[in-house]
Image (cartoon, rainbow, N blue to C red):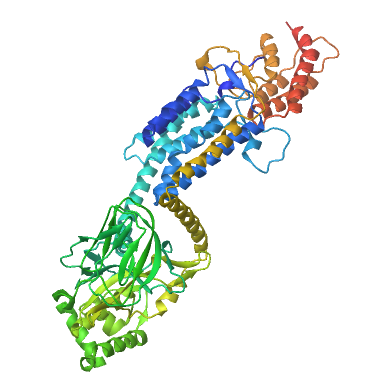
């Protein structure tokens, strides 16, 4: 019995795959890809020509898919810089895996040789897989990454899945029962979806405040104000991600601190920069900028190179104290305010710039009235510490030395946030009771103590520079190196003054997981690539980068068009095009036996399996006059054929060439031996 379907079209129902691709394009808004992909897939039903692809051709298609995936991930890694990368990769899966599916749909076998998907596969016999349904499921998964905010995705998923399952359902169950089970599953899925959505909202509400308070203040800094963690309850935790790379000039050491912003008015728990005004920075030549210094001391200038990624159109630059010149920095505009903050305007990108600086100078404006302001609520605790240390009788330098010793010997560094207790403010609790906290406590307390003694001071935040990376031969600065300190105005210049116990560095380093080195490797890889691209831009050498695509294109062409000619075959159309989809095993010769028995009235009912039919035949002996006819032997031989047929029909591995020939020969032998004898019944 010949198959009533053409094996070239795959077993998925007609138009279902194309509809699923269009659904994917609708959910992800990738219509420009979805429409041609759907046409390519469904067009295979109408194109009569097929190519005889072997394992090498399928491997070339698989390699090309892998190349597309890696290229996409690398591109997104250097452009997105956010968790959106994950969703974008999922969204593009149907397009990335298209070459392999096209190779299957337009091959004579209409299946993929599985050996092409594994580099280590050494099996000589081909193993064919039909990837149609996996691609169908992958398209639905990619559609889910579109993150639609309505019920359209769930309804589309339900309808498309129901159509696919309907064609694969067992005929033993009635359509009514099948539809009822589908409705129950759909309702349960909807309830689960709503429950997960509500759980997501609850987690989002409970963590948003923590994220804003303890993480974003270092990565999205406002030059006008910052919200500290002073008074919070919980535990402060920062990221291990590398944010800056600092390379000092030869034979010089880097600065201990790199500043981003400074503020001058405190209102717990917030620091504010009063009347902040930005003015343009002068550009001395292409990509070179000269900052306005408030002091002009004749001292030695040092230099360093800072590399980082700017993620917004407007960002705050990280600079050492006393920066005077910035070189090799591409920007639309640079501005600075009176508090030493430098703001860059330009396209988000990787930047690497050199800074000339001298920590004996400053770009901060001279002192103003707010540099001595003290909140009334903090005065009692401040006055108590001043009297305890007898600071009013000391010189400015003696005050600095006393405070340094006091905070380093009488206080501990801690990330535990306890808020306030029996004192009026959290800062009072820190100074008078707990005497343990993180850098924001130390910097704020020091700034206000100095102001209480008539010494102008400001609050500064930025990063500590202390970790030398041997892999890179330069210093790296991580999110957990975010730091706060004091700027003190002495002898007509602003100086950095940090009273946080030095143990804070070892304290935070000890909490780092050993897996952090894996992230460092990929960070270094992206840094090297970004550095190379920037070099090509600076040297006007991007044209050479494009020239590198020529050999890549040539390799791709050789993958798909090797010297060996692939034979094209024309497939004869059978039956109605809209009805043709493959069901494995329908070309089995066992159907010739079924036809013979049906013609004799020994009909297999539609609800019966072959095993059930054989059992019924055993229970109803045939009346045949032939003396050498053995009905038991006939049914045993038929049972052997049924077992081979079941493997051919249902086993994903199918039959190899020898077993397939065995099924054909056993069937023919059975017909030659028993068909004529059974016909005597009629």
Counting from the top left corner in percent of width and height, residue 119 is at 65, 42
Residue 289 seen anywhere in this rendered image of the structure: yes
Would residue 305 be found to the left or right of residue 225 on screen?
right
Q: Residue at x 51, y 44 (%)?
A: 70
Q: Position of residue 182 (x, y in %)?
A: 44, 32
Residue that protrudes farthest toward the right in the picture: 628
Q: For the point 38% across and 67% down, which residue is it? A: 237
- Most foreground residue, 42 or 307: 307
**Horizontal side, residue 237 vs residue 598: left or right:** left
Q: Nearer the viewer, residue 103 or 616?
A: 103
Where residue 378 sits in the image (x, y, percent)? 19, 79
For the point 49% across and 21% down, which residue is it? 43
The residue positioned 59% from the left and 31% from the top of the image is: 560
Vertical arrangement, residue 405 with respect to residue 603, above or below: below
Q: Quadrant of the N terminus?
A: top right
Residue 86: horizontal and vertical position, in percent? Answer: 43, 47
Q: Is residue 355 left or right of residue 602?
A: left
Note whether 259 is above or below 349 in the view shown: below
């Amino acid at each position: 019995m010949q198959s009533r379907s053409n094996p070239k079209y795959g077993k998925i129902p007609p138009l279902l795959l194309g509809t699923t691709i269009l659904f994917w394009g609708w959910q992800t808004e990738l219509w420009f890809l979805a429409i041609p992909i759907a046409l390519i897939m469904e067009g295979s039903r109408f194109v009569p020509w097929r190519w005889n692809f072997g394992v090498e051709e399928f491997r070339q298609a698989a390699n090309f898919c892998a190349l597309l995936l890696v290229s996409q991930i690398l591109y997104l890694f250097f452009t997105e810089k956010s968790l959106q990368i994950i969703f974008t990769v999922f969204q593009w899966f149907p397009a990335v895996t298209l070459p392999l599916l096209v190779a299957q749909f337009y091959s004579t076998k209409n299946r993929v040789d599985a050996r092409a998907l594994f580099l280590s596969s050494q099996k000589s016999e081909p193993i064919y897989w039909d990837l149609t349904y996996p691609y169908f499921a992958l398209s639905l998964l990619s559609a889910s990454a579109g993150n639609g905010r309505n019920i359209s995705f769930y309804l589309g998923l339900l309808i498309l899945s129901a159509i696919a399952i309907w064609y694969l359902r067992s005929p033993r169950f009635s359509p009514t029962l099948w539809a009822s089970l589908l409705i129950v599953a759909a309702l349960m899925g909807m309830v689960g979806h709503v429950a997960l959505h509500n759980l997501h909202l609850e987690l989002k509400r409970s963590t948003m405040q923590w994220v804003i308070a303890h993480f974003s203040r270092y990565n999205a800094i406002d030059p006008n104000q910052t919200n500290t963690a002073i008074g919070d309850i919980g535990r402060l935790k920062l990221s291990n991600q590398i944010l800056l790379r600092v390379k000092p000039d030869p034979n010089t050491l880097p600065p201990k601190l790199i500043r981003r912003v400074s503020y001058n008015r405190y209102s717990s728990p917030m620091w504010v920069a009063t009347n902040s005004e930005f003015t343009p920075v002068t550009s001395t030549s292409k990509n070179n900028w000269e900052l306005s210094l408030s002091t002009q001391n004749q001292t030695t200038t040092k230099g360093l190179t800072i590399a980082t990624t700017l993620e917004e159109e407007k960002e705050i630059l990280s600079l050492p104290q006393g920066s005077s010149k910035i070189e090799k920095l591409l920007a639309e505009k640079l501005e600075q305010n009176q508090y030493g903050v430098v703001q860059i305007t330009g396209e988000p990108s990787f930047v690497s710039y050199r800074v000339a600086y001298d920590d004996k100078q400053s770009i901060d404006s001279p002192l103003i009235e707010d540099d001595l302001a003290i909140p009334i609520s903090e005065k009692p605790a401040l006055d108590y510490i001043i009297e305890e240390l007898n600071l009013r009788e000391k010189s400015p330098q003696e005050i600095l030395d006393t405070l340094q010793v006091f905070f380093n010997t009488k206080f501990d560094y801690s990330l535990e946030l306890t808020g306030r207790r029996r004192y009026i403010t959290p800062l009072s609790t820190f100074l008078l009771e707990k005497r343990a906290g993180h850098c924001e406590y130390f910097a704020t307390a020091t700034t206000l103590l100095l102001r209480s003694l008539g010494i102008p001071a400001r609050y500064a935040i930025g990063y500590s520079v202390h970790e030398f990376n041997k892999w890179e031969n330069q210093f790296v600065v991580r999110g957990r190196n975010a730091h706060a300190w004091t700027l003190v105005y002495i002898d007509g210049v602003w100086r950095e003054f940090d009273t946080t116990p030095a143990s804070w560095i070892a304290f935070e380093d000890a909490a780092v997981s050993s897996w952090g080195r894996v992230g460092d490797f990929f960070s270094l890889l992206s840094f090297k690539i970004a550095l190379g691209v920037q070099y090509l831009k600076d040297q006007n050498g991007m044209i050479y980068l494009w020239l590198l695509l020529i050999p890549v294109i040539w390799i791709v062409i050789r993958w798909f068009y090797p010297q060996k000619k692939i034979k094209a075959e024309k497939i004869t159309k059978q039956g109605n095009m809209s009805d043709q989809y493959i069901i494995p095993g329908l070309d089995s010769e066992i159907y010739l036996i079924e036809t013979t028995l049906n013609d004799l009235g020994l009909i297999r009912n539609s609800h019966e399996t072959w095993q059930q039919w054989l059992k019924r035949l055993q229970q109803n002996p045939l009346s045949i006059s032939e003396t050498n006819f053995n009905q038991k032997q006939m049914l045993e031989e038929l049972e052997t054929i049924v077992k081979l047929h079941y493997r051919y029909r249902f086993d994903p591995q199918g039959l190899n060439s020898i077993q397939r020939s065995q099924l054909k020969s056993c069937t023919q032998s059975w017909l030659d031996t028993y068909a004529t004898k059974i016909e005597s019944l009629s």
